[in-house]
Image (cartoon, grey):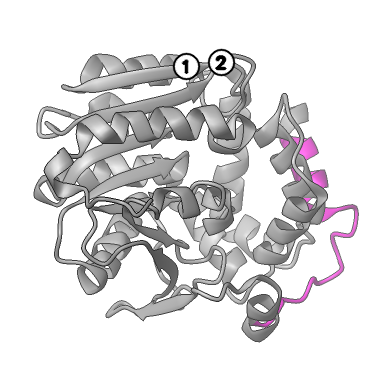
Amino acid sequence: MTGFSDKLTALFDNNPLIKTSDIDQDTLVRRYGHPDSRYASLPDGNRVHYLISGPDDAPVIVLIHGLTMDNAVWETWRPVLAEQYRVIVLDLPGHGLSTAAPRWQADIPHHVEVVHQTLNQLTEAPFTLIGHSMGGWISWLYTLIHPNRVTALGLVAAAGWTDQRRQARTAQSFMNFAGNAVGRTILRYANGDRFIEEGMKATFSPDAPSEDMIRRYQDMLHGPGHRETLLSLAKHWEGSPKADDTDFTAITCPVLIISGDCDGLIPTAHAYAFERKLNNPTLIMYPRTGHVPMLSCHPQCLDDTRRWLDEAVPASEVPATSP
C-alpha cells in the first residue's frame, strides 16, 4: 500500500495537525471570476456558476468538466465554438465558483440532477452534451436518463467503468478512506496543495500543467464547502452506476469518444469499451496524449470535434456566421 501512503502524505503536505482555512467566495470570485459569469440557484440548495455565450438562436452545446477542475479546462474551446453555437459551460457543485448545499450527497446521479435542474433554467432546446472524465460519466448517465434532451454526446477521457489496474485499486482505497467517518474528519483539515499538484501532474502527463493552473485548482480546493463536497463524492464514488452493468441501447444519438493513448488515469480500453457498447460511435485516439486532450492537443482536438459536430448537428439548425 505504498501508493496509498504516498497519497496521504501528499494530502497532508507533512502538516497533519495544521488546519487549512477555506478561501471565502468573494476572494475566489475576484481571482477567477469571468465577465460572463452567471449563477443558477437550484431547489436542492446548490448554486451553480456558469458561462453562456454565442448566438441566442444557435444550437446549444453544454460542456462539463472533470473532478477537481472547473470551466477553465474548456477556455480554449468556448470562444471558438461560440462563433457557431450557443455554448454553456458549468462548474459542478464543490468545484470552481459553484457552491454545494450543506450535506449534499455528491454521487454521480445527484450530479446528473444538478445538471438537469440547471439546464432546465437555461434552455428548453435539446443540446449537444460533452463531458470530460467525471464529467463524461455524468454526461453518459444524463443521456440515458434524459435521451430526448440530448441530440449528440461527446465523451472525452470519460470515466465510469470498473478499473482493475493496481493503481486504480490504490486510488479506490484512498477514496474509501476519504469517504469513511474517520477519514472525512481528518482530511477536512488537511492541506491539499501537494495533493492537487501531484494530481495535476498525473492528469496532464506526458505534458505538464502550468503553474497558474496548479495554483487555480489549489485555491479551488479551499473554496467554501468544496472539500466537504469532494469527501462526499469519495464516499459515494464506488456505489455510483458503472458502465459495466449499463444497457446503452437508449442512447441512439451520435457519440464522439476522445481518448489519449498515454492517459494514466482512464485506460484506453475504456474508450474502446464505449465504442463497442454505443450505437453510433466515432472514436478518436490521440498519440502521445494524456488525460486532457482538449488542452494537450488543443487545435487538433477542437478541429476534430467541430467536424464531428458538422455531421452530428443538422446543418439546418446551424445559423450562418458573419464573414
How many C-alpha atoms fall within 10 Å of the one at disc 2: few (<14), some, or many (≥20)? some
Task: Please provide the residue range marked out in magenta.
Answer: 4-24
Tag 1: residue type? Answer: Met
Nearest to the observer: residue 102 or residue 147: 147
How many C-alpha atoms fall within 10 Å of the one at disc 1: few (<14), some, or many (≥20)? some
Q: Looking at the image, can residue 160 be seen?
A: no
Answer whether residue 54 is magenta in the image.
no
Residue at the image point whose x is 11% and y is 27% from the top: 249
Element under disc 1: strand
| Residue pointed to by mark 1 | 285
Mark toward the start of the polypeptide (1 vs 2): 2
How many angstroms separate mark 1 from mark 2 (CA)? 6 Å
Instruction: Check if mark 1's residue and mark 2's residue have beta carbons within 8 Å.
Output: yes
Residue at the image point whose x is 45% and y is 41% from the top: 132
In this view, the mark in front (1 or 2)? 1
Q: Looking at the image, can residue 73 be seen?
A: yes
Judge from the rendering whether residue 36 lies leftward or rightward of residue 30; answer left or right: left
Where residue 83 appears, as percent x and y from the top left, is 39, 53
Q: Is residue 27 above or below residue 175?
A: below
Nearest to the observer: residue 250 or residue 128: 128
Where residue 203 appears, as percent x and y from the top left, is 65, 35
Instruction: Tell me the number on the disc at residue 261.
Output: 2
Residue that protrudes farthest toward the right in the picture: 14
Count of numbered circles on the image: 2
